[in-house]
Image (cartoon, helix red, strand yellow):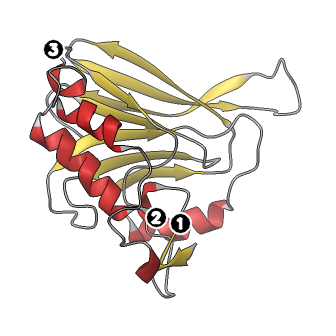
Amino acid sequence: MRPANSVFTPVNQVIGSVVITTLRFDNGRGLGASTARWNLLGQQTVLAHFDQSGDGPRAYWADSWNGYPAARERLVAALLARPAANPVVLGGDIHAFLVNDVHAVAMDYDSPVVATELVTSSISSQGPAQTSLDRWLRENPNVRLARSDYRGYVRVAVEPEQLHAQLVAVDDVTRADSATHVLAAFDVESGKPGVAR
């Protein structure tokens, strides 16, 4: 975590300007030119705003887009400038499952939802305490699920009118042949960003 005054520098970025340009469709290609019904955007962490400050001073986790709010604004602006159908953001690397609504304005939960985000847990690495996620969940109405008490992966099935996501938990991370179970399942309707359970 780093203090708020160090994260608002506009030059800080998570992905480079070439990627943003591609997303905006400045060159006639990329996400902005997509004619696909569903557009999956893979990236390395959590895009949606996720407040972890609780009752303390506002702090920002530098290993997510929270640490780079100007960069997140540029990415969301690119998604809005040339909207591709049904953007779904896939993320990970936080050792927890998250299912989020990505809003046009990060901390304005009345602003339109522009994308759905599915964040996968790790297969074996321990995540943050579930009690912390439970506390943070109350501060984040855009987060539909936050679970760090299971390891696993996200399985996505795409149909023309609906995307189905299953959060699959590994029962025993010490066994290569471990059974798994579906921890939670969500659907995204075509043309309606955000998840339904």
The answer to which of 22 and 175 lies nearer the viewer is 22
Give the residue type at disc 1: Trp
51 relative to 175 in the view: left or right: left
Residue 191, position as x, y percentages in the image = 13, 29
13 relative to 105 in the view: left or right: right
Q: Secondary structure at mark 1?
A: loop
- Do the CB atoms of the residues marked 1 and 2 lie less than 8 Å apart? yes
Disc on res. 67: 2
Q: Secondary structure at mark 2?
A: helix
Q: Which residue is denoted by mark 3 in the rendering?
A: 35
Gap between marks 2 and 3 measured at Cα: 32 Å
Residue 81, position as x, y percentages in the image = 11, 41
Q: Which residue is denoted by mark 1 in the rendering?
A: 61
Crowd rating for badge 1 (residues with CA inside 10 Å; few <14, some 14–19, many 20+): some
Crowd rating for badge 2 (residues with CA inside 10 Å; few <14, some 14–19, many 20+): many
Q: Residue at x 69, y 62 (%)?
A: 129
Q: Between disc 1 and disc 2, whose residue precedes? A: 1
Q: Between disc 1 and disc 3, whose residue precedes? A: 3
Looking at the image, can residue 45 be seen? yes
153 relative to 23 in the view: left or right: right
